[in-house]
Image (cartoon, rainbow, N blue to C red):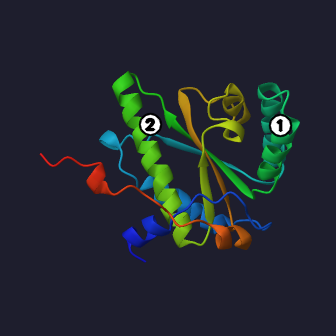
Amino acid sequence: MTVLELLESRRAIRNYEQREVEPEKIEQLLIAATLAPNDKMREPWNFFVIQGEAKKRYEQVAYEYLEERFPSKPKLIESSIEVVKKTPTVIMVACDIASNEADTIDNEYAVCCAIHSMWLAAEELGLGFVWRTRGVGLVHDNRSYQFVGSPEGKKMIGTIFLGYPDSKELETMKEKKRTSFKEKTVWL
């Protein structure tokens, strides 16, 4: 499969089969991430793989977050937690905070590239992947830092939900629609 074919077939997958992702496949995703471009070879990425008992603790932290954030929406809380429970693997991704703002921003961009590299590798490996930043992704909540051990000098960039795609979701996916580059490009 070519890179363009991978990009065309890549989708956000939110529902998974109830089977674990093999450690070797997770390692392949992490290798793909570390091949991403990054300024001055700072390699600013940090990965926190969450499975098994750690995932049960993550579910509890996400539940507490949702209860606090949406106290009058119990159905939203339950459906969101159900998604977390049915996700076999969660990977939180952080970047290094540099000594200056410009380098920190470059680090964030590099980590975004690393996550995208993981997404393409997941597509090639037959894995479903969604990059979350809000809600149960906990990226914008301090609990995410506490959950991974309060590392100093890190900024959460994304939480990846990963697993084997549920076949029903694949069957009902809509065709990917994108605005043509022609409408978004100025040739100078």
The one nearer the camera, 178 or 141, is 178
At 82% from the left and 47% from the top, the residue drawn is 79
Tell me if mark 2 has few (under 14), some (14-19) or many (20+) residues whose alpha carbon lies within 10 angstroms of its own.
Answer: many
Is residue 123 shown above or below 80?
Answer: below
> Label 1 vs label 2: CA separation?
27 Å
Looking at the image, residue 85 sits to the left or right of residue 148; the answer is right
Q: Secondary structure at mark 1?
A: helix
Residue 129 picture location, percent across and down:
61, 59
Query: Which residue reaches farthest left?
Result: 188
Q: Quadrant for the C terminus, please.
A: top left
The image quarter in which residue 94 lies: top right
At 67% from the left and 28% from the top, the residue drawn is 141
Residue 31 appears in the rendering: no
Residue 167 picture location, percent across and down:
71, 73
The image quarter in which residue 2 lies: bottom left
Query: Which residue reaches farthest bottom?
Result: 1
Is residue 72 shown above or below 57?
Answer: above
The residue where tag 2 is placed is 108
Is residue 102 shown above or below 41?
Answer: above
Contact? badges 1 and 2 (CB < 8 Å): no
Q: Secondary structure at mark 2?
A: helix
The image quarter in which residue 125 lies: bottom right
Tell me if mark 1 has few (under 14), some (14-19) or many (20+) residues whose alpha carbon lies within 10 angstroms of its own.
Answer: some
At 68% from the left and 57% from the top, the residue drawn is 14
Residue 138 picture location, percent across and down:
68, 35
Residue 119 numbered tag:
none
Q: Quadrant for the N terminus, please.
A: bottom left
The residue where tag 1 is placed is 63
